[in-house]
Image (cartoon, helix red, strand yellow):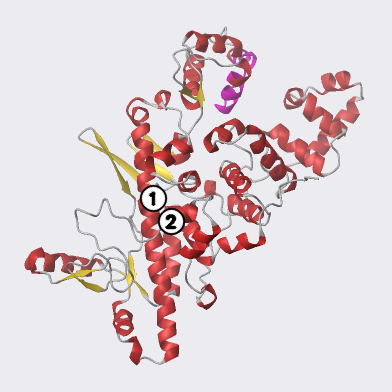
């Protein structure tokens, strides 16, 4: 019998997650603040890394200007700092591409990170990519604050999953907010990943029923409380019945009404409410190192220049690392070194070069994906939220030429500064609602329409959810009343009955 997730992963597949692959994935997923801390700690732990000094850079620029590019006899590798002949296409020391100014935008670092992040990549391909003897490599453990999502991913990693199940699980976790609740509809996740809704629901159920903290992954507070009662074995208790069937009455403290409709005494209802108070409606709230507790610093900046949008990485305060030149000279004469010293140098040199390549690839990937997003959502930047277009991970993946899982990892937890404000990259993705013209309207744009309708309504006669749905239908947007109610609640707007009472 099938219980929970499939056990389809073969033992040999565990070879996929080598330390090098884990490091590459970790770096890709880091936001700017995390990457900065990671590089600072790497600088402290790897003696072959050094930070470029501004004075040195200024002197190099001055020398280049004085000599002229035609007088230079060598190229300097941007990764390891080694010298190479002018005609060389790759560094003789680390194998990195040596790019001219014209090639800078086209050439990519000599590392196939998209293959690393492609969940469909074969084991053989991964093992060919990972050629080094990992047992001889020094491990680099960088302490990071554990966020709620980190904790959930750790639990996900302990399960034996198929590639698709893991991909779905990672996507679900990326949309769990700091309170521990799922912030999007499961249909949106299914559409973004191109999988069946039933598969998303099944993986979500496993997360809800087996992950800690209890209640995490619930779609709303009501479901969160019911999950916690079920975990206690109290799914048929009076408290569960109240939450399941009379949640709105509970929120309004209509104790007599609840007692009457359930056929119980008022004291029984009061006791059940005390039981409910022991539950946690926000299981992720207060979790150490949550994103909410940190200052939001944009990872990417979008500037409008002469009517065009330019994407640049926010590298302010970011350590600029390179291989230490003194140790590099020693490596050039490594045959004269004692075996232990040579082995020590080679190990740390390999780690340094790997890190610099991965960071460069991470930066290029973040930039390219952001550029693709901005290209699609240009109207959003120029006209506002109503003009946000429906967008899926697959669309951006196809535009950039990467796997959907790469896009998912890049947009999670990263922010972009635009002329319109600072937004999480995930904000630009949403599913669409069908319109009469055949074009889809994004959920975000529909929410903005709902907000505008309510802001301009007659306070004495506020619009009901059904009336809002009818008005949207007049604009060619097909939407159910319950979807309007959901969007209204997500906007933090009370129902029409409460809006009228507030006005009275």
Image height of 437 relative to 387, above or below: above
Residue 283 located left or right of residue 322 = right
The crowding category of the residue bearing disc 2, from other C-alpha atoms within 10 Å (few below 14, some 14 to 19, many at least 20), is many
Q: Position of residue 408 (x, y in %)?
A: 49, 44
Q: Position of residue 121 (x, y in %)?
A: 51, 53
On the question of residue 68 being in view, the answer is no
Query: Which segment did they paint magenta?
Result: 484-502
**Residue drawn at the location 43% of the way across and 58% of the way down:** 35
Q: Secondary structure at mark 2?
A: helix
On the question of residue 151 being in view, the answer is yes
Q: Position of residue 352 (x, y in %)?
A: 40, 71
Q: Which mark is residue 70?
A: none
Q: Quadrant of the N terminus?
A: top right
**Residue drawn at the location 24% of the way across and 66% of the way down:** 54
Image height of 121 relative to 55, above or below: above
Residue 194 position by quadrant: top right
Image height of 62 relative to 298, above or below: below
Considering depth in this image, is 415 or 404 the residue closer to the camera? Answer: 404
Q: Secondary structure at mark 1?
A: helix
Residue 37 located left or right of residue 88 = right
The crowding category of the residue bearing disc 1, from other C-alpha atoms within 10 Å (few below 14, some 14 to 19, many at least 20), is many
Count of picture labels = 2
**Residue drawn at the location 55% of the way across and 9% of the way down:** 470
Residue 144 located left or right of residue 93 = right
Image height of 219 relative to 452, above or below: below
The answer to whether marks 2 and 1 mark residues whose Cβ atoms lie closer than 8 Å is yes
Residue, disc 2? 113
Residue, disc 1? 365
3D distance between C-alphas at marks 2 and 1:
9 Å
- Magenta stretch containing residue 501, yes or no? yes
């Amino acid at each position: 019998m099938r219980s929970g997730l499939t056990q389809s992963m073969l033992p040999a597949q565990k070879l996929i997650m080598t330390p090098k692959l884990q490091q590459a994935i970790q770096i890709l997923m880091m936001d700017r603040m995390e990457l900065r801390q990671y590089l600072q700690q790497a600088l402290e732990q790897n003696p072959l890394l050094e930070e470029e000094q501004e004075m040195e850079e200024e002197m190099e620029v001055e020398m280049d200007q004085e000599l002229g590019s035609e007088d230079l006899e060598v190229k300097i590798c941007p990764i390891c700092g080694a010298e190479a002949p002018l005609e060389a296409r790759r560094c003789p020391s680390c194998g990195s591409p040596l790019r001219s100014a014209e090639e800078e935008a086209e050439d990519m670092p000599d590392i196939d990170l998209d293959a690393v992040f492609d969940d469909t990549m074969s084991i053989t391909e991964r093992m060919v990519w990972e050629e080094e003897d990992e047992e001889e490599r020094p491990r680099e453990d960088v302490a990071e604050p554990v966020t709620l999502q980190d904790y959930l991913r750790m639990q996900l990693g302990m399960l034996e999953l198929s590639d698709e199940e893991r991909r779905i699980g990672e996507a679900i976790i990326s949309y769990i907010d700091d309170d521990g609740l799922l912030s999007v509809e499961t249909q949106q996740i299914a559409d973004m990943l191109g999988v069946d809704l039933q598969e998303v629901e099944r993986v979500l159920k496993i997360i809800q029923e087996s992950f800690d903290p209890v209640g995490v992954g619930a779609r709303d507070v009501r479901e969160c409380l019911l999950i916690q009662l079920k975990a206690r074995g109290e799914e048929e208790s009076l408290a569960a019945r109240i939450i399941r069937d009379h949640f709105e009455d509970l929120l309004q403290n209509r104790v007599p009404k609840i007692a009457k409709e359930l056929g119980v005494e008022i004291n029984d209802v009061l006791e059940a409410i005390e039981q409910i108070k022991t539950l946690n409606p926000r299981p992720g709230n207060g979790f150490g190192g949550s994103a909410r507790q940190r200052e939001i610093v944009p990872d990417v900046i979008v500037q409008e220049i002469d009517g065009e949008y330019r994407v640049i990485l926010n590298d302010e305060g970011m350590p600029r690392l390179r291989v230490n030149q003194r140790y590099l000279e020693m490596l050039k004469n490594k045959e004269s070194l004692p075996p232990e010293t040579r082995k020590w140098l080679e190990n740390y040199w390999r780690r340094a070069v790997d890190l610099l390549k991965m960071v460069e690839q991470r930066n290029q990937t973040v930039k390219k994906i952001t550029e693709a997003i901005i290209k699609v959502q240009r109207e959003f930047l120029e006209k506002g939220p109503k003009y946000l277009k429906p967008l899926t991970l697959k669309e951006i993946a196809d535009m950039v030429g990467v796997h959907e899982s790469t896009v998912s990892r890049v947009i999670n937890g990263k922010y972009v500064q635009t002329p319109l404000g600072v937004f999480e990259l995930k904000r630009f993705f949403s599913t669409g609602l069908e319109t009469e013209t055949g074009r889809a309207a994004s959920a975000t744009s529909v929410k903005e329409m709902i907000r505008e309708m309510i802001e301009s309504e007659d306070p004495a006669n506020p619009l009901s959810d059904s009336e809002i749905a009818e008005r949207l239908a007049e604009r060619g947007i097909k939407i159910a009343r319950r979807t309007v109610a959901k969007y209204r609640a997500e906007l933090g707007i009370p129902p029409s009955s409460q809006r009228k009472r507030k006005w009275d």
